[in-house]
Image (cartoon, rainbow, N blue to C red):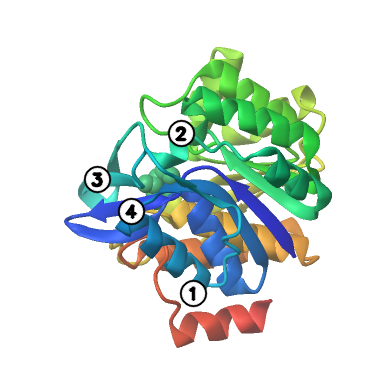
Amino acid sequence: MKVLTFGEALFDIIEGSAHLGGAPLNLAAHLAKLGAKPAVLTAVGRDKLGKILISRAKEMGVDTSYILIDDKRPTGTVTVKLEDEGIPLFAINEGVAWDAITPDERRFEALAAEEWDVFCFGTLAQRSEENRKTLKRLLSGIKAKHFFYDVNLRAGFYRKEWILSSLEHSTILKMNEEEAVTISSMLFGTTYACRTLCRLLMDRYQKISVICITKGPEGAAVYQDGVYEEIKTTPVEVADTVGAGDAFSAGFLYAYLSGYGVSKAASIACTLGTYVASKPGAVPEYSEELMKELGMRL
Ligand SMILES: OC[C@H]1O[C@](O)(CO)[C@@H](O)[C@@H]1O
């Protein structure tokens, strides 16, 4: 399974300790752990953190050949404050390496020459003009069976026009419950229930064939071919919810692209997302128990 993710790669500083982070990198790391072959198109600085990030990503089985090195900007960092129930508040530094993901012609050609199973992107990296340009080129130049858009809104770093153009290009859409409320009022001027929102989005965006909505401890919902289904998850004690959504995405994509139906894929995704919420950071080690469970279900 060949996956390309595009966007931020960084370190989350959660209560003083550094963890690998950035939704596209988290997603790739989980996909690699599950057995896919993910590559990340991002940028780090020519600094110590950048070196560590690349070597950790490599160790986990992520293809780092599209991680660009920026001579001027530092590797991205995010300070994460945890609110009640491990809900994170992000202070996302600006002017960092992943704000200028600008591959040269040779790299663009290499990316366009490959056949990807899925190309994954989000909203945050679109905060810079350089990245919006790169993304535009990728969305029209890359050969991928699926275009996975994780809405993943971060306060202060999204605009309606970026979301609308992202929706135009996606075939699989993922958001959480709060993002569903934002999207609903942004697009339709009112807060529709998730089921109605899914139907309206699919009527409007012909390319979208699957929508996932994560609901924290409640589990998730998945919508395909007019069928809306809710998947329950077993609640856990939460360490922090950082990266739980990214782990959900990885579990869903891995299972769905392996040929499982959307409800089974969403259930596996919930297992992985819940596990990540129970551990500090976005990409914790997998326990024996988790691997056994995934092994039995995949
Ligand atoms: O990508 C932006 C932020 O969101 C996360 O990916 C979690 O979903 C963090 O690791 C990162 O700081």
Task: State the separation of the CA atoms marked 3 and 1.
Answer: 24 Å
> Do the residues bearing badges 3 and 2 touch, measured as CB atoms within 8 Å?
no
Q: Which residue is mark 1?
A: 59
> Mark 4 or mark 2, which is nearer to you?
4
Secondary structure under tag 3 reads strand
> Do the residues bearing badges 1 and 2 touch, measured as CB atoms within 8 Å?
no
Amino acid type at image mark 4: Asp
Q: Which residue is mark 4?
A: 47
Tell which circle, 3 or 1, labels the residue nearer the N-terminal end: 1
Amino acid type at image mark 1: Glu
Work out whether residue 217 can be spotted. yes
Badge 3: residue crowd in 10 Å (few <14, some 14–19, many ≥20): some
Badge 1: residue crowd in 10 Å (few <14, some 14–19, many ≥20): few
> Mark 3 or mark 4, which is nearer to you?
4
Q: Which residue is mark 2?
A: 153
Residue drawn 78% across the image and 32% down it = 140
Residue most toward the top?
189
